[in-house]
Amino acid sequence: MLGIYGGVLYFGSGEIDPTQTILGFDPFLMNAAFVLGCGVLGWLAGPTIGRGAWHLLHQRKAHLIQEVSPVALQKI
């Protein structure tokens, strides 16, 4: 959601000239594609950044998660 919101803020703030094309396509269509692209990049990068932030903020508890993960994965 943050990626889409950021894309809307960035691409929605500029003026759109409907007489000019972007890569040969309609500017409204390309802005929508760029916003969706920002959402996809946020979806891909979000777990990595979130996991790093969680480990940074919970350093005392992070080793407990690392100890339990292999045991839990063996039971699956």
Image (cartoon, rainbow, N blue to C red):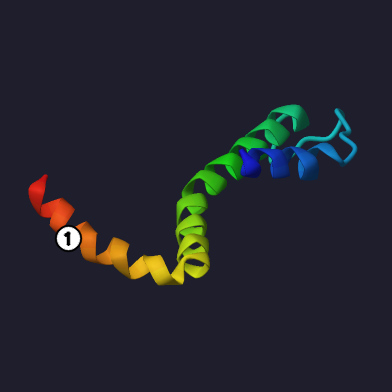
Name the amino acid type tagged 1: Pro
Q: Say which residue label 1 marks.
A: 70
Asked where in the image residue 30 lies, by quadrant, the reply is top right
Instruction: Characterize the local packing of mark 1: few (<14), some (14-19) or many (20 or more) Cα atoms within 10 angstroms.
Output: few
Task: Determine whether, in the image, residue 10 is placed left or right of residue 48.
Answer: right
- Residue closest to the far left: 75
Task: Determine whether, in the image, residue 37 is placed left or right of residue 59.
Answer: right
- Residue closest to the far front: 60
Asked where in the image residue 76 lies, by quadrant, the reply is top left
Q: Position of residue 13 (x, y in %)?
A: 86, 40
Q: In the image, what residue occupies the spot 23% across and 66% down?
A: 67
Residue 3 versus residue 70: which sits nearer the camera?
70
Q: In the image, what residue occupies the spot 87% across and 34% down?
A: 16
Residue 35 versus residue 3: which sits nearer the camera?
3
Task: Determine whether, in the image, residue 16 is placed left or right of residue 11.
Answer: right
Disc 1 is placed on an element classified as: helix
When the figure is inspected, residue 51 is found, relative to residue 31, above or below; the finding is below
Task: Determine whether, in the image, residue 52 is placed left or right of residue 6.
Answer: left
Q: Position of residue 54 (x, y in %)?
A: 48, 60
Q: In the image, what residue occupies the spot 78% across and 45% down?
A: 10
Q: Position of residue 38 (x, y in %)?
A: 62, 44
Q: In the image, what residue occupies the spot 75% across and 28% down?
A: 28
